[in-house]
Amino acid sequence: LRAGRSWRQGKGVEKPNLQQAAALLEAGCRFGSADSCTLVARMYLEMEAGLQFVMPEGTVSLDLGAAADSFQRACSLGALQACGMWGDLYLNPRALLPRPEAVARNIQPDMIQAIQAWTQGCNQIRAPELSDIARPGQPPQADTRSCLRLAQLTELGKGGIRKNPTRSAQLYRRACYASGDPKHCAIADRIEAGRTSEQRPGAGEGRPASVSPRADAPTDSELITETTSAERRSVQPHR
């Protein structure tokens, strides 16, 4: 990891060498360094590795399949933020291209793969309770991005996931604890309040119980299908 970072940044060497950096980080990833996997994945996203030029147009082709593989490896090694990026790549690979004219190769949208990645990142099996997520002196034991993606799909009943307000509120609350951002808890509160009002005595008599969508719920078109460059940069390897 240290050698790969040095070649990438040009520190302690004559000049940067991205090819050498990527090779070293790939090796580190294969030997079980989650940070190496994350960093080389970012290199693929930032046009520092895996570039090809499609002639005669001269279009830039990025190997986002390799980026997804590296994020997946980092995720399996315990880097939960990488799980979210792995999922986002399979949600909408084109959204992660740094240039609109660029093309992605070795990857296709795959919602099943995306949900698998986010499920692993939200980490409910290993950290089932909210108190397990935010432990003093430790990084969050759940990935905010992953929990939010699952919360939105569950709230809307999209991606093959059954609509479930109770489950959606739980996922928003996990995102709240993972990020420390109270707005996610506020969304969970509004969903739960809506469900409670539907369940009070006399409500909805003569028809199956249902929950009306909250006023600010994401619409189909607003369901996250894009990831900004700032979000890409948010996945940082540990120093």
Image (cartoon, helix red, strand yellow):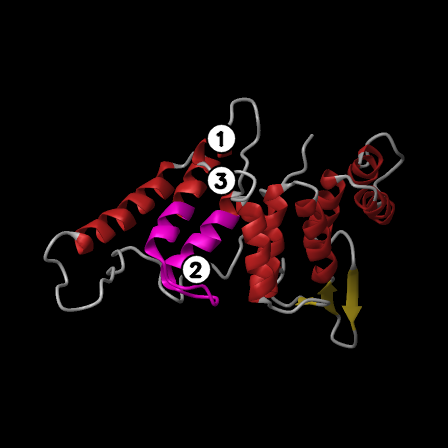
102 horizontally vs 30: left or right = left
Tell me the number on the disc at residue 153.
2
From the image, which quarter does the N terminus lie in? top right
x, y percent for residue 152: 41, 56
Helix, strand or loop for the magenta stretch, by majority: helix
> What's drawn in magenta, residue-wise?
146-171
Q: Is residue 208 above or below residue 122?
A: below
Mark 3 closeness class: few <14, some 14–19, many ≥20 residues within 10 Å: some
Find out whether residue 88 is within the magenta segment. Answer: no
Residue pictured at 22% horizontal, 66% vertical: 208
Write down the residue under mark 3: 128
User: Mark 2 touching mark 1, by CB under 8 A?
Assistant: no
Q: The residue under label 1 is which amino acid type?
A: Ala
Residue in front for this viewpoint, 46 or 27: 27
Q: Which quarter of the figure is the C terminus placed in?
A: top right
In the image, residue 157 lies at what x, y percent? 39, 64
Instruction: Report the residue marked by disc 1.
Output: 134
Image spot of residue 99 (x, y percent): 62, 61
Q: CA distance from mark 2 to mark 1?
A: 24 Å
Which residue appears at 40% of the width and 66% of the height?
A: 221
Residue extending furthest toward the bottom: 56
Residue that lies at the very extreme toward the left in this rendered image: 202
Which of the two labelled residues, at mark 2 and mark 3, occupies the earlier sequence position? 3
Residue 142: x, y in percent?
53, 40
Q: Residue at x 68, y 46 (%)?
A: 76
Q: Residues within 10 Å of mark 1 (few under 14, many from 20)?
A: some
Q: Is residue 154 magenta?
A: yes
Q: Residue furthest right?
A: 14
* Residue type beneath disc 2: Leu
Question: Residue 210: in sight, yes or no?
Answer: yes
* Mark in the foreground, 3 or 1: 3
**Who comes first in sequence, dot 3 or dot 1?**
3
